[in-house]
Amino acid sequence: MEQLALENRKLELELHRAVRPDFWSWAGQLSPVLVTVLGVAGFLFGVKQYVDQQKAGREAAIQQEKRELEARDRDFMKPLWEKELDLYFRATAAAATIATTKKSPQREVAENEFWQLYEGPLVVVENQALSGAMKRFGRCLDGHDRCDDNELRLRSRALASTIQETIEESAKLRLSEFSKNKFQYHR
């Protein structure tokens, strides 16, 4: 009877294993599917990494090109900016000399300097506000406006203040923006 009970127990265990397989046999059956899924996931991850690297490379190239363009603009604009500042200070000095000096050879030289700047070099760099300030000051000199000494000094200081604003505005310009807001004298 004991032997029969043991054989019964053995058959129960075999039957139990046949109905409910253990974890390793179950994992063994799923391993091809699992390997395939992991392989596809690894491939997709690699493709994503590649795409992200290409995008980052393109963005870095665009940024580098932008920096090189800005450096080229600065290099090109530097001598222009220096000349522009020189012209502004010459115009301010001429206007101040005219406004503070009575008829003399020094004032005559300053008036000639003012008109030379007005008709030529400042046209290249002046914006509309500076052109207007130069014109208002010039109207005192050419007789269009009757200006006493006080009015001449006021217009000289107004010209200097306009030049200050123009310097600040010009300092921010890039080469592609240089001619914006400039007074154009095309025929």
Image: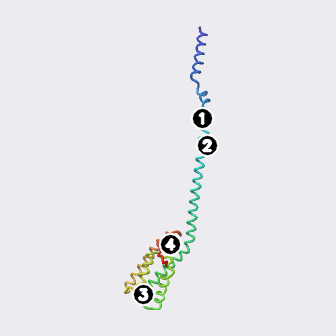
Left/right placement of residue 33 relative to residue 104 reads right
Which secondary structure lies at badge 1?
helix
Q: Nearer the viewer, residue 126 or 75?
A: 126
Please tell me the numbered disc located at residue 34.
Answer: 1
Image coords of residue 97 (percent x, y): 45, 85
Could you tell me if residue 79 is visible in this image?
yes
Which secondary structure lies at badge 2?
helix
Image coords of residue 72 (percent x, y): 58, 68
Looking at the rendered structure, the kind of residue marked 1 is Leu
Mark 1 vs mark 3, CA separation in Å:
94 Å
Residue for badge 2? 43
Looking at the rendered structure, the kind of residue marked 3 is Asp
Residue pushed farthest bottom? 104
Q: At 60% from the left edge and 15% from the top edge, which residue is drawn?
A: 11
Which numbered disc, 2 or 3, marks the residue that appears first in the sequence?
Answer: 2
Which secondary structure lies at badge 4?
loop
Looking at the rendered structure, the kind of residue marked 2 is Phe
Q: Residues within 10 Å of mark 4 (few under 14, many from 20)?
A: some
Image coords of residue 43 (percent x, y): 61, 43
Residue for badge 4? 179
Mark 4 vs mark 2, CA separation in Å:
54 Å
Q: Are marks 3 and 4 in contact (CB under 8 Å)?
A: no
Q: From the viewer's perspective, is residue 40 above or below residue 64? A: above
Q: From the viewer's perspective, is residue 178 above or below residue 22? A: below
Mark 3 vs mark 4, CA separation in Å:
29 Å
Looking at the rendered structure, the kind of residue marked 4 is Ser
Mark 2 vs mark 3, CA separation in Å:
82 Å
Mark 4 vs mark 1, CA separation in Å:
66 Å
Residue for badge 3? 142
Q: Nearer the viewer, residue 51 or 78?
A: 51
Q: Are marks 4 and 2 in contact (CB under 8 Å)?
A: no
Q: Residues within 10 Å of mark 3 (few under 14, many from 20)?
A: few
